Image (cartoon, grey):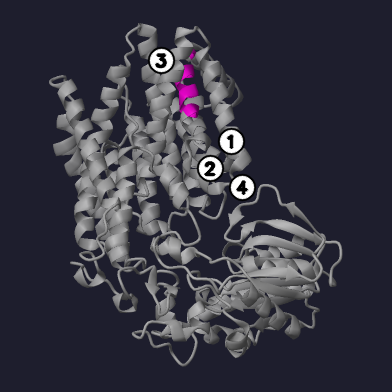
Amino acid sequence: MSSTESTKTAYRAEIDGLRAFAVLSVVSYHAFPAGLTGGFTGVDVFFVISGYLITSHIFTSLDEGNFSFLDFFQRRIRRIFPALILVMASSLIFGWFALVSEEFQQLGKHVASGAAFIVNFILVGESGYFDTAADTKPMLHLWSLAVEEQFYLVWPVVLWLAWWRHFSLIWITLLVAVASFYFNFRFVESNPTETFFWPFGRFWEMLSGSVLAWLMIYKREVLDLAKMRIDIFVERMVPLSFAPGKLAFTENAMALGGLCLLMYGFMGINSNVTFPSTWALVPVCGAILIIAAGATAWSNRIFMMNPVAIWFGLISYPLYLWHWPILSFLQIVESGELPHRDARIIAVVLAIFLAWLTVRFIERPLRFGQRCVRMKSVGLTGAMIFVGLTGLAISRTDFSESHTFENLLIKRPGAEHIYGTSSKWYRGQDGWLFLGNAYNDTVAKLKLTPPPVPANIEREASLFANLTEAAETANTSVVLLIGPNKSTIYPEYLPDEIEPSGRRYVTFFTERFNAIPNLTVVDPVEGLLRTKESSGLLYYRTDTHWNNKGAFRVFSILAERMGWRVPEVSFREGKSHSGDLIAISELESFPITAGDNWQIEWARDPDLETKHLANQPETSFGRTEIVMNNAPLSEQTVWIIGDSFTNAIAPYINATFKEVHYLGHWNSKLSTLPQDLTSAKKKPDLIIVIRVERSF
């Protein structure tokens, strides 16, 4: 990260030590996510440091009457640009040799947006069901740098205007901080991606450091007096062999308490919690306490001010920049699989070495010294613009002829399952598109190379066994409905090079699931294959999902198995449908033909009322909600967890049951649903889990 000390402020070694804790926690989390589950909270520590140091500089400069926007931004440029330009340029060079066309284009887009410090907004726009995995985006980590730069652009102007108009700086700071925290708290459940990446839900963390800066500059005597009174009180209450006034209980308690909060955040928080939310208060408060305690607190002297911590603190910014591209590229060349532990260790060591080289030979010559300051700033700005424009040009250039998997300098495992220029999609016959091996190893599973590992089968089985055990106690039935892959139902449209296996990958799982009591497994594949010739197309040609008619056929198979009535519907041909595979492949000129899109015509329109569940995240099949049917075919209450295959089948479920609760994506809810069921006051009659075949 880019937090920097003011040249007008005395050097504070404990802050460099705090930087070391922050960056090493982030690096450890990215390299060994199972070992330090909350290491990503180190970014929040950086935010506090940045807010504290930058605001301290601004307050001091305003008081002395020598604040200059030109000087402020020149300092930021000389601090931030050298290492960032080097890392982005190096990533583009490596990407030229290691990435296929669409990967290289995406890298170019992220470099361009990183150079403009808007990559956090770009990442929000990319977030979606079929988005590239975060681990294979080498510039992903620049989101936090973008948030900081957005803060640096806005906050100096706000403070200068407040100072010029003689407004209270602390009240302005508190007002903006509270508004930002409210945005974070209010929207983190319903819009988690936006709240995580957007500056509006993050500024309060930096402003927490700003509030501390105001207290340390303008109320230092009050703080010192309060500390002294607490120390005297403790000395009187707890007789110890300390000279009067030498206990320093308050500072030591603050530093130790801050360290404990940081360690709790690093080890106690994990990626399953909604974040930032109130969880971000843990690292934020920890950082504030450590900074406020100062250099005399013994835990700061031991943990934050030792030579190793200070050394890592001094290279923390380039280390943050280098570590993620190295780890991400490593995972890319491993075809998206988590690299071996030894490879990750080597990657971290390489990042540390490159960070030291960057500080020694790039940062120091360009950042420090008063000679040619303006020339350095102009040159760095020009270099940043050049790198950004290069990235933009790459993002808009088609490299499909030169950057193929066959031409890669570094060969990837699993390349035999990739057809064409992309691992995300491939062309079938007669205008059909199919999902590529990048998603759940779809092609490898289609060819059954290799069969599933028994441990994976047992892991999935244990999830359903836990659910059915809780459901049996609640007198609730459980159904697993499998959504067959399009390639399973329409193998005749696959390219000639792909030969599906005689046995489906998912059947290894369903055979095991059939032995679980109180679990009904419905795999509609035979029914779909039997009726597809007479029913018209049941899946979209250019989409991964079944269409409305296919979904109705699946629901009819499910209803027949369970003994339910089925709503009366008919279908008429709809307009041509441009599906998600068009978006994934970016084949904007791909011919779209009619005949695969069906509009539902109800014999009797369902009388439905929908209640959206507050503070619930978006899923791949819409918002979590409760649907009430005033004229149901069944009086049962149903809970649904599913994936995007839920979309088309939901209308028939809603038209059948009295009350349907859509609780979220199975990926996040399946493991917690037994506890939700146990604690629910009103138990459902039925739970339906809807999962696409490739997810097993």
Q: Do the residues labelled 3 and 1 touch (CB within 8 Å)?
A: no
Q: Is residue 271 covered in magenta?
A: no
Tell me the distance, in whole angstroms, between the alpha carbons under discs 2 and 4: 9 Å
Q: Which residue is drawn at 30% across and 79% down?
A: 416
Q: Do the residues labelled 1 and 2 touch (CB within 8 Å)?
A: yes
Q: Is 250 on the left-hand or right-hand side of 237?
A: left
Q: Residue at x 56, y 51 (%)?
A: 273
Foreground residue, 170 or 627? 627
Tell me the distance, in whole angstroms, between the alpha carbons under discs 3 and 4: 35 Å
Label 2 belongs to which residue? 195
Tell me the distance, in whole angstroms, between the alpha carbons under discs 4 and 1: 11 Å
Label 4 belongs to which residue? 189
Q: Is 74 on the left-hand or right-hand side of 190?
A: left
Frontmost of labels 3 and 4 is 4
Q: Earlier in the sequence, mark 2 or mark 4?
A: 4
Query: Quick check: can you spot residue 217?
Result: no
Q: Which of marks 3 and 2 is nearer the N terminus?
A: 3
Q: What stretch is highlighted in magenta?
A: 207-219
Q: What residue type is labelled 2?
A: Thr
Q: Which residue is drawn at 62% across and 87% down?
A: 534
Foreground residue, 252 or 263? 263
**Residue 466, position in %: x, y?**
66, 73
Label 3 belongs to which residue? 59
Label 3 secondary element: helix
Q: Are marks 3 and 4 in contact (CB under 8 Å)?
A: no
Alpha-carbon neighbours of circle 2 within 10 Å: few (<14), some, or many (≥20)? Answer: many
